[in-house]
Amino acid sequence: MKTAAITGAIAFMAFAGSAFAQATPQDTPLLPDYIAVMQALDRQGTTTAPTVTITHHAGLFLTESLRDGRASIGFGPDADNPVLRWSRRADGEIDALELRRDHNSATAAAETPRPLGQRSTVAGQDCTWRETTRKLFEISPAREQTCITDDGIAIETKLVGADDFPIYHNRLTSLERRPVSQAEIRPPAEILTPDFWLRPLRKYDANPSLADFEITLESPGQVVIKLLRHYPWLYREQRYDRDIITVMIWNELEDQGIFYKQVDDTRYLKASRTSEKSPSPMKFDFTSEKVALGKSDTVLGETCEWFDLLPDVSDASKKRCLTRDGLVLKEESGNIYTATSIYRRPVALSEMRLPPDAFSAGEWGLP
């Protein structure tokens, strides 16, 4: 039975914790430094996972959501929508990262909060309720009700959907107002380097049947694809006729690699570093199976066989014409791409490079 899940699967894994709002009120520009611990509640008001710790300093937030020993961490000037996210396993290993910069997000902000004329006391802190209407996942409006202290700290938040259906609810359990140093909120420097994500997880034996190669493919729409392979590492760079570029570097034996996309000034980067298989592992070159189509082709004097790489997926198509040693000579995935150059040559992992500023904090609007 075919599935329509590919659209969601190609997107980067969602990190928990962003749903727990800690927005800076527009009418309170200078928040104090503080550390707040928020607890999720179920529909009956009983505590449930996750617990979220929010640390604020000088307009920057570090949010850490903890569930079953796994932490999802966000960093940036907006606690609801962090620019940088990463996840840490229970053993302390950082295994996933996401960077996002969307210049259209400023125009998609929620409406101005409306005061509700109610006050509460939460964990010994007094606050005033207000309500904001948001679009949830771009489908239907939801009402976010937040209780804000007089100095601008959100200490209880409820998101209510249609028919007052509760989507989430979190409440302060502790609040400490104190000076917070930059070191307390600074992300680990190593995760903002490609070397961290591409460092081999283990030693890999060479596979003589999978030769190193460099291939260039082109389409009539002036899209150019560059492919490199040094088993088990693969590189795919795709450039369009305007300022659009995507680059993927990944290990086909592990859930490890980096995906980067730039469209004009909008940027997106995801990275993964794990050999642990999960129910929804991060996918780079998304394929399901490799089914022979019973036809061949010849490109640049080389013969290739056609395969369907997504035979069980209803909402996408990917077909490739492959040589016996796995070189891509043609690809059909929306457009038709044909190899214009083929080189079987030794390829070093150092040749598989992202744009120079892909991990530059400044390019993402981070300090």
Image: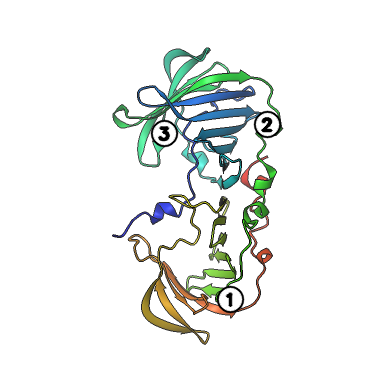
Q: Residue at x 68, y 39 (%)?
A: 367
Which is more toward the observer, 152 or 171?
Answer: 171
Label 2 residue SS: helix
Which is more toward the observer, 83 or 50?
Answer: 50
Label 1 residue SS: loop
Label 1 to label 2: alpha-carbon separation: 49 Å
Q: Residue at x 56, y 42 (%)?
A: 89
Tell me the number on the disc at residue 208.
1
- Please provide percent x and percent y for residue 348: 67, 68
- Is residue 171 left or right of 193 when viewed as pictured? left
Q: Residues within 10 Å of mark 2 (few under 14, many from 20)?
A: few
Type of amino acid under label 3: Arg
Q: Earlier in the sequence, mark 1 or mark 2?
A: 2
Callout 1 touching callout 2 (CB < 8 Å): no
Callout 2 touching callout 3 (CB < 8 Å): no
Image height of 95 relative to 327, above or below: above
- Is residue 356 left or right of 265 when viewed as pictured? right
- Please provide percent x and percent y for residue 344: 61, 79
Q: Residues within 10 Å of mark 3 (few under 14, many from 20)?
A: some
Tell me the number on the disc at residue 134.
3
Q: Which residue is mark 2?
A: 184
Type of amino acid under label 1: Pro
Type of amino acid under label 2: Glu
Label 2 to label 3: alpha-carbon separation: 31 Å
- Please provide percent x and percent y for residue 262: 56, 55
